[in-house]
Amino acid sequence: MKTEISILKNSKADVGIGTLIVFIAMVLVAAVAAAVLIQTSGVLQQKAQQTGKEATAEVASNLKISSVVGKTDSTNGKVQLVNVTMELAAGGSSIDFSKVVIKYINETTTSTLNLQTGSTGATASLFNYTEERVGSGSANYVLQSGDLALVTLNLTLMNQDLYPRKKGTIQIIPETGTMIIKDLVAPATYGENTMVQLFP
């Protein structure tokens, strides 16, 4: 009499291996996705910080005009030179005046001036820059914390003398930051004054 031997085939392990493979694949996909998200968020954070700094520099006014004084001619009939005293505003960063552009506007003419690096003084297209007080470092063309700068415009050479009751506008455009605009209104008469306070 023959003995029958029955061999049962267990297929449960096959299902377990397939599930494991799918699980590992999902973990790998999630890891790759997480790495991409982390890298993207890091790049976005750097760009946001850089944009914030640039936006702050654009909207923040670094310059502060303390006074504007005009020097009249020998007959006290018109202002020939304009001296603008300025300093850094609170929290302002250093400003290189070799990159600053100044415009002077009156009723009929606009003049654009750049820095005069020589010793001849202000001209028709150049403004003169000196430091009356050196706060930090040495005297140069860079306005730093504690410095008190004097910018001189020669209105006569620009053919824009400021006569009594007339108006003029000074626009100071730094490399970064907002443009500074100062309106000048001449008094009804200069009298016998050789120096006239135009602002404040």
Image (cartoon, rainbow, N blue to C red):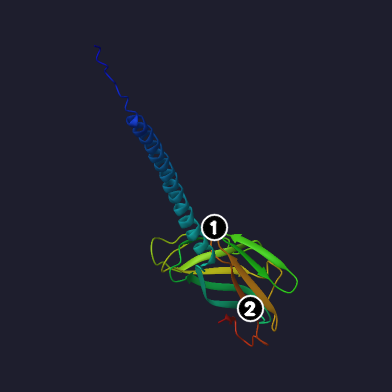
Determine the image quadrant of residue 76.
bottom right
Residue 102: percent from left, percent from top: 61, 65
- Image coordinates of residue 48 in percent, x first then y, are 48, 56
Q: Which residue is mark 2?
A: 184
| Position of the N terminus by quadrant | top left
Q: Secondary structure at mark 2?
A: strand
Residue drawn at (35%, 29%), measured in percent from left and top?
A: 14
Q: Is residue 196 above or below residue 57?
A: below
Residue 130, image x, y percentages = 50, 65
Residue at 61% x, 73% y is: 81
| Mark 1, residue position | 98
Dot 2, how many residues are within 10 Å of its Cα: few (below 14), some (14-19), or many (20+)? Answer: many
Quick check: 108 left or right of 55? right
Residue 29 can be seen in this image: yes
**Residue farthest toward the top in the current orientation of the protein:** 1
Asked if residue 191 lies left or right of residue 96, the reply is: right
Placement of 147 over or under 4, stated as above or below = below
At numbered mark 1, what does the secondary structure look like: helix, strand or loop? Answer: helix
- Closest to the observer, 142 or 18: 18
